[in-house]
Amino acid sequence: MSGADPLALLTARRTLTFWAMAFVLANIAASVIVLTTYGTIDDDVLTPIWVVGISGLSMWATYLYVVSAISNKYGSGNVFTDYRISFAWRDLWGVPIGIASQFLLVTAVTFPLTKLFPDQFSVEEVEKRARELSDAATGGWVLVLFLVVVVGAPVVEEIVYRGLLQQGLDRSMNPSVALVITAAIFAAIHLQPIEFPGLFAFALVLGWTYRKTQRLGLPIITHMAFNASGLFAVMVL
């Protein structure tokens, strides 16, 4: 096993299998936790932020358990090394990249759709889920929402999608194809068809930042800035 590629034994097939297993287990864990503590999973009901928080924690714990197990079996046992989790000052370029992706890229991608399908892709519909989360957060729960959306989700999702999935697919196919497949899966797992075009475009940016640096620092910072600017937009603007 090469020191430069500690997860060299993790083929594309294994990568997709482990990712699918982690995705299913994480969603089962989140559903069980929500049903046990809150009693319902109803998209028509405004979900309290504490439910969003414990749901996120259960999903992240599952994902991190799986990536840690993969690291122990197929890598060095050090998740920071195996998934290339490191940061440098130049990763702060992710802040303007993330903000530009939120306000310029996503707008450019969705604007034609708002003209072609005005009912389905109205600004209100595209922002609906974010505004519902914002409306549910009051007082100290705003901090919880920030930690979930701006800190937890970007870190775990980048480890799973760029650190595990894109890195694993790179070994068996053209890196550009691996980038596109990873971006499509990333956008699809959010289970919001109306958000898919914008998320797919943004995921291409995340994949590109990972490909250029071969580290997760820049994608994580970019993802954080993207989520933070989107949250700021629905809460303040």
Image (cartoon, grey):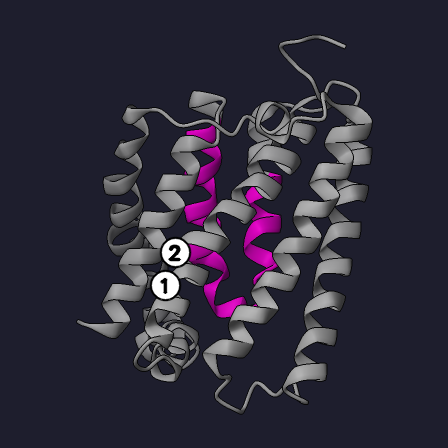
Q: Main secondary structure of the magenta part?
A: helix
For label 2, the crowd category at 10 Å Cα-Cα, with few meaning under 14, some 14 to 19 and many 20 or more, is many
- The quadrant the C terminus occupies is bottom left
Q: Quadrant of residue 222?
A: top left
| Image spot of residue 144 (x, y percent) | 41, 68
Q: Secondary structure at mark 2?
A: helix
Q: In 3D space, how far apart are the residues under numbered discs 2 and 1 (Cα atoms)?
A: 5 Å
75 relative to 143, above or below: above
Task: Indicate which disc residue 224 carries.
Answer: none
Side of 97 relative to 194 (left or right):
left
- Kindly identify the residue that appears in the image at 48 percent across and 83 percent down: 48
- The quadrant the N terminus occupies is top right
- Kindly identify the residue that appears in the image at 81 percent across and 34 percent down: 13
Magenta residues, start to end? 181-210
CB atoms of marks 2 and 1 within 8 Å: yes
User: Mark 2 sits on what residue?
Assistant: 150
| Image spot of residue 172 (x, y percent) | 73, 23
Q: Hey, what amino acid is under mark 2?
A: Val
| Image spot of residue 145 (x, y percent) | 40, 68
For label 1, the crowd category at 10 Å Cα-Cα, with few meaning under 14, some 14 to 19 and many 20 or more, is some
